[in-house]
Image (tube, rainbow, N blue to C red):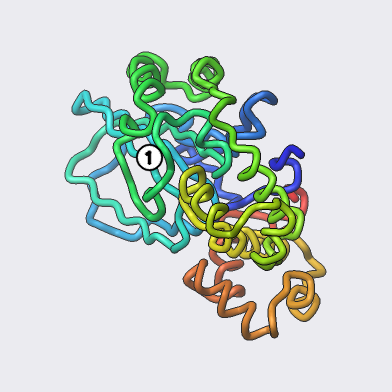
Amino acid sequence: MELHKIYHPITATPFKRTEEYMEFEPCDVLKPYIRCFWGSRNVVMQEESQEDVIGIVTPDTCMDIIFTTDFTNNKIYNKFCGIDDRTIIMHEKNKEKRATCVFAIRFYAWGVPMFAEESMRNTKNNFFDAGYHFPGIKREIEKRLFDVTDINQLIPIVENLLLKRFNDRNKNPIVFQAASKILEKKGNLLMANLKQEVFIGIRQLERLFLEYVGVSPKNFASMVRYQYVWSDFLYNKNFNIADAVYKYGYSDQAHLCRDFKKYHSMSMSDARKYAMQNVGNIQDRFSES
């Protein structure tokens, strides 16, 4: 099963479209492994500013490699963001006016091993230099960043680099099978039942998930369920919380709301308001679903 066709994780601000942040679909060959490319359309002038909250990052079961090219100081910064099961409050402080360009690759959690040269163990809630897990990809991409500033021109170049680095031998069939079962059930799956579905002991399955995904299958399933609830709540104009309790396997409405707030750091109504600040016309959210 092609997992990306049944699962579309979203951020806390899925309608955000600015010169500093835009999302782009990968080519068809990479779609099973990469959720999107994202970044600034071209070079952006960052003004001097005081430290301020610029947004939140909620668990999307993805992992990102992010490059920031600083043309003012002739530097390239990078980081690899492991899978997160927490909300991150993003802050920014610019000490000077500078010209920058951001380019990032957002991988599905199950897609990372096909491109990484190290395991995902101990990557949860952590940040790394991209050179540790992706030395070849980092080196090849950074060669282009000063010369190719238009993201529409950079993406095809990066896609070719990724296809050359793709290693299908790193695909673990048990992890893919387990992830498929979790997604089919929208995260509403007991680990005892998952063990029976994939014919493997739960401890061995946990070791494999930590190695290839960075979290336990139970943790992954919980985040997947949150993602399905969040998408359903945001895009479905007929969303009914009582129906959602049954659909996603919560004990009651309070349980669903607590679980949502644990991952999103705010109530469901506040989360919708926060997401909708990026939409000029409320009907846009239904046309994008």
Three-letter code for the amino acid on which mark 1 is drawn: Phe
Would you call the spot at circle 1 few (<14 residues within 10 Å), some (14-19), or many (20 or more)? many
Can residue 201 be seen in this snapshot? yes
Q: Which residue is mark 1?
A: 80
Q: How many marks?
A: 1
108 or 94: nearer the viewer: 108
Location of residue 191 by image quarter: bottom right
Q: Is residue 271 above or below residue 196?
A: below
| Image point (65%, 38%), residue name | 173
Q: Secondary structure at mark 1?
A: strand
156 or 40: nearer the viewer: 156
Q: Is residue 36 above or below residue 264?
A: above
Q: Position of residue 252 (x, y in %)?
A: 70, 85
| Image point (63%, 27%), residue name | 30
Q: Position of residue 258 (x, y in %)?
A: 56, 79
Q: Position of residue 229 (x, y in %)?
A: 68, 65
Q: Is residue 41 above or below residue 261?
A: above
| Left or right of 128 on screen, residue 252 | right
| Left or right of 58 on screen, residue 34 | right
| Image point (45%, 55%), residue name | 84
| Image point (45%, 41%), residue name | 64
| Left or right of 246 on screen, residue 194 | left
* Quadrant of the snapshot with the N terminus: top right
